[in-house]
Image (cartoon, rainbow, N blue to C red):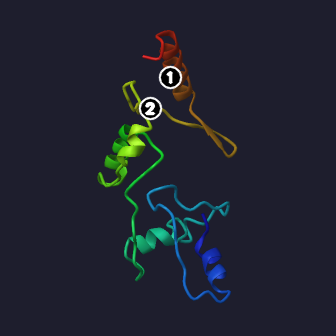
Amino acid sequence: AMLDPDEVAALGHGAEACVLVGDPSQLPPFSKWRDARRAGYGVSLLERVVAGRAAAPVFRLEDQYRMHPRICAAISDAFYGGALRTPAAVAAARPLDAPLHFVDFRHAETRDGASLSNAFEATAVVAVVKALRDHGGH
């Protein structure tokens, strides 16, 4: 993602129009500049346009083609007010016979420099994978 000064600089080369493409519900802007959020760059230009702080038409795509329909439904309900849909042809191409579960791990992450890890979560994932393997995936 770009920060506003980058976007403004790109537009400063004679552009008469701009099309922003992305998903404002996804990851926030990223910068190695430590004071970016404090300087007001914690919200992307796209997020501000969608929130109505700029006069521009906004079109949201509601058909998704990547996820299994049950995963899509959970994400759609949690983040998009139930607006995402999976076309029937996509759903038919993504069979999933196993039950679907989301597990919430509320254990602290450990920081090592710029990296984060969560030993509890890693141990739990290994245990689930072993259990699935030992029981034939069911």
Please state if 80 lies on the left or on the right of 129 as rendered: left
Please state if 40 lies on the left or on the right of 58 as rendered: right
Residue 36 drawn at (x, y percent) = 60, 66
Q: Residues within 10 Å of mark 1 (few under 14, many from 20)?
A: few
Which one is nearer the viewer's eye here, 72 or 47?
72
- Secondary structure under tag 2 reads loop
Q: Which residue is mark 1?
A: 124
Please state if 21 lies on the left or on the right of 36 as rendered: left
The residue lying at 61 percent from left, 65 percent from top is 35
* CA gap, disc 2 and disc 1: 9 Å
Residue 69 drawn at (x, y percent) = 37, 41
Which numbered marker is on residue 74? none
Q: Residue furthest top?
A: 134
Residue 69, above or below 80: above
Which one is nearer the viewer's eye here, 122 or 58?
58
Which one is nearer the viewer's eye here, 89 or 137?
89
Q: Residues within 10 Å of mark 2 (few under 14, many from 20)?
A: few
Q: The N terminus appears in which quarter of the rendering?
A: bottom right
Q: Amino acid at mark 1?
A: Ala
Q: Badges 2 and 1: C-beta atoms under 8 Å apart? A: yes
The residue lying at 46 percent from left, 62 percent from top is 24
Residue 81, above or below 66: below
Q: Which residue is mark 2?
A: 105
- Secondary structure under tag 1 reads helix
Residue 66 drawn at (x, y percent) = 48, 46
Q: Amino acid at mark 2?
A: Phe
The residue lying at 52 percent from left, 14 percent from top is 133
